[in-house]
Amino acid sequence: MPQIVFLPHAELCPDGAVVEAEKGESILNVALRNGIEIEHACEKSCACTTCHVIVREGFDNLEPSDDLEDDMLDKAWGLEPESRLSCQAKVEDEDLVVEIPKYTINMVSEG
């Protein structure tokens, strides 16, 4: 079973976390299931960038993003070549190391 290492994030995951993931499960769903409350203002419909993450290790094991996700990512704060929307990036067979950016462009927090 693959694991996701969430790097420390001051508010969402101060100590970082290593969690189990199911193949085919989105990074966002894994995070939420483990108490890491990544914002997802559009309710996982690929209509915003609040769930933006950076996949520091294992990026090449993910299926490529589609045009809709790429268009949304263009609006994300702190975009990097390994950026993905966590609601769209599905876990495969390999472990991942994920960084949650410090900021989102969301002006209203769900929490």
Image (tube, rainbow, N blue to C red):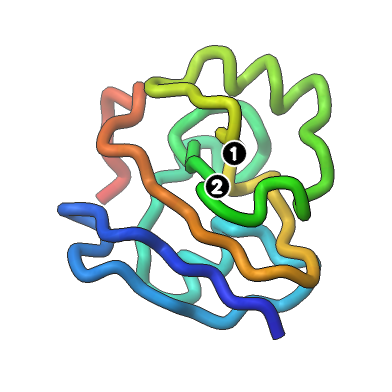
Left or right of 102 in this view: 25? right
The quarter of the displayed image where residue 24 is located: bottom right
Q: What label sits on residue 62 in the rendered view?
A: none
For image coordinates 79% across by 71% down, the residue present is 93
Image height of 18 relative to 51, above or below: below
Q: Is residue 31 above or below residue 105?
A: below
Name the secondary structure under disc 2.
strand
Rendered residue at 67%/47% (across/down): 59
> Residue under circle 2?
55
Q: In the drawing, does residue 40 fall left or right of residue 106? A: right
Residue 72, relative to residue 109: is it above or below? above
Residue drawn at the location 77% of the way across and 34% of the way down: 65
Q: How many numbered tags mark residues here?
A: 2
Q: Which residue is mark 1?
A: 85
Counting from the top left corner in percent of width and height, residue 46 is at 66, 33
Residue appearing at x 55%, y 47% in the figure:
55
Viewer-proximal residue among 20 and 46: 20
Local secondary structure at mark 1 = strand
Please rate how many residues cluster around mark 1, counting C-alpha atoms within 10 Å: few if below 14, some from 14 to 19, many from 20. many
Q: Disc 2 marks which amino acid?
A: Val
Q: Nearer the viewer, residue 43 or 3?
A: 3
Q: Position of residue 79 (x, y in %)?
A: 48, 22
Circles 2 and 1 in contact, beta carbons < 8 Å = no
Q: Is residue 62 above or below residue 75?
A: below
Spatial separation of the CA atoms under disc 2 and disc 1: 10 Å
Graded by Cα atoms within 10 Å as few (under 14), some (14 to 19) or many (20 or more), the crowding at tag 2 reads: many
Q: The disc labelled 1 sits on which kind of residue?
A: Leu
Q: Nearer the viewer, mark 2 or mark 1?
A: 2
Q: Quadrant of the N terminus?
A: bottom right
Q: Of the residues under marks 2 and 1, which one precedes in the sequence?
A: 2
The image quadrant that residue 36 belongs to is bottom left
